[in-house]
Amino acid sequence: MRYQIGRALDLLSVFILLFIAGTSDTPRFTDSADRTRFYTREIEFDYPNWVQDALWLKLEQASLHSPFIFERGTAREIVFEYLRVTFHIMQTERRIEQLYADPQITDKETASAFLRTQQHELLDRQKQLAPFAEAILQNQVSETLARLGLTTLGQPIPPVLYHNSPTPLALIVSKREEIVQIANISILPTLTLDEQIALEDQVAHSLNVSTLVVPVGGVGVYPTMVMETTDLSWMLNTVAHEWTHNYLNLRPLGLNYSTTPELRTMNETTANIVGDEVGHLLMQTYYPELLASNSDLSLVALDKQIPPSSLFNDSPAFDFRAEMRETRVTVDKLLAEGKIEEAEAYMEARRQVFWQNGYLIRKLNQAYFAFHGAYADQPGGAAGEDPVGPAVRALREQSASLADFLNTIAWMTSFEQLQQAIQQ
């Protein structure tokens, strides 16, 4: 009976899709975005086809009645095997890239033949495991949401549906005179770094704006899109984060995502808070040994830039969030005084300081802060002195539960409402 309910909810998701597709934290076009799209039309990510393919995969998963056909121990082994295969795929891809970059190897096709065969075998194995691993993790997220009271009649609405795949890059555009995101356009993940830089420069010089191409870990289409990774904790946080966007998109806060910068920050900070709490509880429940022993560190290291200084250097720790907050505050002050060139020169100087301390930031500019500043679930960082993040955190602190917090903020349509709520 349980798998029949799950299958019915998966089918219901097809109809919910039509509503959610018009909202979520996927890029939404404005006049500024339309001007930018003159330069991106030929390289934009194809969301309709991706969603169609992902929905079909989810319907196939539902027809298999997974994850209910597996015992808990077997389900865990399937998830771990999927992560191991993904790990070996990433290793193999890196070895192939290194081989093709080696100037001493002339016949690269022959030299890489074994690795490419191994890569194809691993990809086939991953394709076999993915539907089961995704269904298992979807069910575990759903059960965790139920424990936290974030369900209707015992089921999360919309149902938790996600798919691991290469995620698009995002071209972020900000005004130069003010840190404000005026465009966020998804582009193909296959663009080389040279092509990304060329696009940034072309748009920046043509429209007199600040630009940055950033990687995206997840996208709140439906089913949600989550980047392939071997970091299980990060993956679960992201699945819950993107589900939160889908949840909010059925309510006023999500529907007004792009109305003001404050509402965007409220959406993203809320999704981060929910994602982290749901993900942590899920790890405690199903994979406690990973939390206790950090046994997945070797996998995490492949996916995250861990500064060498933070692991091996005995010198005083470099406080990234505090330093980034100081940078943002200073930039805001310079821009408020109309000193655009001085602010940009200062950001480049600060970027070099971060680089010297092991943080590989390619470009630090207004677009960087416009994008990263909206994720304000922790004090400091790229948000600077923006009051929105602290207000969202204050509401969570004074809420009786995560469900109380989410159900309160979900119905807000302005930052003023949030301020009133935390003052009561």
Image (cartoon, rainbow, N blue to C red):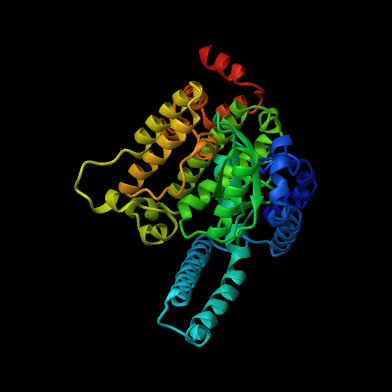
| Apparent side of residue 248 relative to residue 400 in the rendered image (left or right) | right
Q: Would you place residue 69 above or below residue 102 in this image?
A: above
Q: Would you place residue 415 above or below residue 59 in this image?
A: above
Q: Residue 405: give x, y in percent of width and height.
A: 55, 27
Residue at image location 37% in from the left, 39% down from the top? 350
Residue placed most toward the observer, 349 or 5: 349
Query: In the figure, residue 175 lies in which quadrant?
Result: top right
- Residue 228 visible to the viewer: no
Q: Residue 91: give x, y in percent of width and height.
A: 45, 70
Residue at image location 78% in from the left, 41% down from the top? 19
Residue placed most toward the observer, 85 or 191: 191
Q: Residue 178: give x, y in percent of width and height.
A: 55, 28
- Could you tell me which quadrant the N terminus lies in? bottom right
Residue at image location 42% in from the left, 37% down from the top? 345
Residue placed most toward the observer, 2 or 407: 407
Residue at image location 35% in from the left, 33% down from the top? 322
- Residue 117 visible to the viewer: yes
